[in-house]
Image: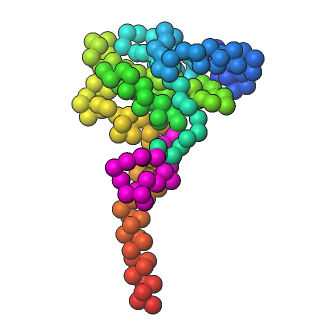
Amino acid sequence: MTKGLYHYMQQAWKKPDPIRLRELMIQWRSEPAALKIENPTRIDRARALGYKAKKGFIIVRIRVPRGGRQRHRTNKGRRSKRHTIRKVVKMSYQWVAEQRANKFFQNLEVLNSYKLAKDGKYYFFEVIMVDPSRPEIQNDSTINWICKKTNQKRVYRGLTSAGKKSRGLTSKSPTNKARPSVRKMYISHKRNRLIHKLR
């Protein structure tokens, strides 16, 4: 069976040329942390995630620093025991990148994102964003669902693919979640303690 162009592009990105990738990351590091670009760097991945080369679709390259997954330590306005920094941010770098893209372009909605590369200091992602106010988007039956009010600010509500994965909702079964809810775990914990006391 004959393979298409996107198949070979996907295979090439699995093991990219390290020298060329290093040159690209040096260039990306000198650019702003959030930069709107004309065309996606990985056209095969962008097309698979819903990107179309038409008005209303925007690609944003985001640079996210690695490390430092703890909250910043406060320096005033709290008791000493409330100055803790041990609370880890339970969000993936990709979800953080999507939120930062939406912060820079507040009139757009995040459709999806994909990873480009990483070095010792940064992660690089490209975020696919959609302008719901464009008539080209509103008249497209495959994407106009994003124009509804129920889908506004979906990245902050954890409704993107990266957000759902961080929340533990990417189960293979459509009816069952990959993890129980916090309330269910709390009730289960209380029940187990009560049973232990009765024994």
- Indicate the quadrant where residue 24 lies: top right
Residue 107 x/y as whole percent: 30, 21
Q: Is residue 3 above or below residue 199?
A: above
Determine whether 57 is above or below 93 in the image. above
Q: Main secondary structure of the magenta part?
A: loop
Is residue 84 in the magenta section? yes
Q: Position of residue 154 (x, y in %)?
A: 34, 34
**Residue at left 43%, top 77%?**
192
Q: Is residue 20 left or right of residue 110?
A: right
* Quarter occupied by the N terminus: top right
Q: Which residue sits at x=50%, y=21%?
A: 33
Relative vertical location of residue 7 with respect to residue 152 in this rendering, above or below: above
Depth check: give the residue in front, 141 or 115. 115
Query: What stretch of residues is rendered in magenta?
Result: 73-92
Q: Quadrant of residue 7?
A: top right
Residue farthest along the left direction in this orientation? 149
**Residue drawn where x is 62% and y is 14% of the image:** 27
Left/right placement of residue 14 relative to residue 193 reads: right
**Along the horizontal axis of the image, is 7 left or right of 94?**
right
Counting from the top left corner in percent of width and height, residue 30 is at 58, 15
**Residue 178 appears in the figure:** no
Q: Tell how many labels.
A: 0
Q: Position of residue 16 (x, y in %)?
A: 72, 21
- Image point 72% across, 15% down: which residue? 20
In this view of the protein, can residue 13 be seen by the observer?
Answer: yes
Residue 109 placement, left or right of 66: left
